[in-house]
Image (cartoon, helix red, strand yellow):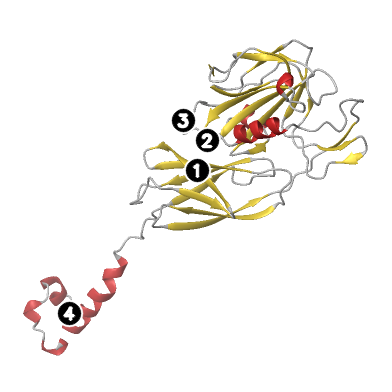
């Protein structure tokens, strides 16, 4: 059939160039794929930071401009699924918390919109955390949390408000000197706490000095020693939105109520030594999707 094609049906530029009918058809067949553009991925996934360490908060940024199901984004690592929130048109973000109790190494992050699924690996680096020896005085050693205290703490960690109340870096909740960093492993009265790490930052301030909210948020937990908060002491929990929350422990006084909305820098209480405490200080814990992460990066550059 190729041999019977008339030269009159060929473009004049091919005829004048001396290209035969057979060659012209072959040229058309091989040229077509060269003109095609590479397909655009329906889900584009980025990590920030690109090289996290234990204790870091990993932002999973998902570009969904070419996804037909952009409102159904799910981010999963192992058995954990983390909520994704829209931050701009065609753009979603989920937070993956990491802690000192985890093992460093490769993680596979699965992102899906219900139709398209992408698997992308990230390596979480190791980090050396200091060891501290704490001797609790009689009456404080061996103190156990009450059932009420444990339940209210679980409820606090489970809060997932869809709104994001913070914008940019957090501020320090106290002007006092930092006494204990995040992630410290401890011996209590000579016994190593195997599944323990210091879940926050300690500020060693004078009793009665102010404690402020590090970012805007809603008060979702107010607990007092008199109610059974033996370990936390007088405590305030603040929901900053989208799985991010602050807890302020060992307070002397509390100046807010559950349901109040506070701004960054607004006083929520004062430094004390209530609960399992060896002296006046503030313990500030920052939780992301229920796990205690290092607050430092949230203070220095912010996490979006």
Q: Secondary structure at mark 1?
A: strand
Residue 232 locus on image (x, y percent): 74, 26
* Residue 163 tag number: 3
- Is 232 positioned to the left or the right of 84 in the image? right
Query: Spatial distance from mark 4 to mark 2, Cα to Cα?
Result: 72 Å
- Is 119 positioned to the left or the right of 89 in the image? right
Where, by quadrant of the figure, is residue 95 drawn?
top right
Residue 50 locus on image (x, y percent): 59, 46
Q: Earlier in the sequence, mark 3 or mark 1?
A: 1
Q: Secondary structure at mark 2?
A: loop
Where, by quadrant of the figure, is residue 22 drawn?
bottom left
Query: Spatial distance from mark 3 to mark 4, Cα to Cα?
Result: 69 Å
**Residue visible at 64% across and 45% down in the picture:** 52
* Residue 83 tag number: 1
**Residue visible at 66% across and 20% down in the picture:** 173
Marks 1 and 4: which is nearer the front? 1
Q: Which residue is mark 4?
A: 18
């Amino acid at each position: 059939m190729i041999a019977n094609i008339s030269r009159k049906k060929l473009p004049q530029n091919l005829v004048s160039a001396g290209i035969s009918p057979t060659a012209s058809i072959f040229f058309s067949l091989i040229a077509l794929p060269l003109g095609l553009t590479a397909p655009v991925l329906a889900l584009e996934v980025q990590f920030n930071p690109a090289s996290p360490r234990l204790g870091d908060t990993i932002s999973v940024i998902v570009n969904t401009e070419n996804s037909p199901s952009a409102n159904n984004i799910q981010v999963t690592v192992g058995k954990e699924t983390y909520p994704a929130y829209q931050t701009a048109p065609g753009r979603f973000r989920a937070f993956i918390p990491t802690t000192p109790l985890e093992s460093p190494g490769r993680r596979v992050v699965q992102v899906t919109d219900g139709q398209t699924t992408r698997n992308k690996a990230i390596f979480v680096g190791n980090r050396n955390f200091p060891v501290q020896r704490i001797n609790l005085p009689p009456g404080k050693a061996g103190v156990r949390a009450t059932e009420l205290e444990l339940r209210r703490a679980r409820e606090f960690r489970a809060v997932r408000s869809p709104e994001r109340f913070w914008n940019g870096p957090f501020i320090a909740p106290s002007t006092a000197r930092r006494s204990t960093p995040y992630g410290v492993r401890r011996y209590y009265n000579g016994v190593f706490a195997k599944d323990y790490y210091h879940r926050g930052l300690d500020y060693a301030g004078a009793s009665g000095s102010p404690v402020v909210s590090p970012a805007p948020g809603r008060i979702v937990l107010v607990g007092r020693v008199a109610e059974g908060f033996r370990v936390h002491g007088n405590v305030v929990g603040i929901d900053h939105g989208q799985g991010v929350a602050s807890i302020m422990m060992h307070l002397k006084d509390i100046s807010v109520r559950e349901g109040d909305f506070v701004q960054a820098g607004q006083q929520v209480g004062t430094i004390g030594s209530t609960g399992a405490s060896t002296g006046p200080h503030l313990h500030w814990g920052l939780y992301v999707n229920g796990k205690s992460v290092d607050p430092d990066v949230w203070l220095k550059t912010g996490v979006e």
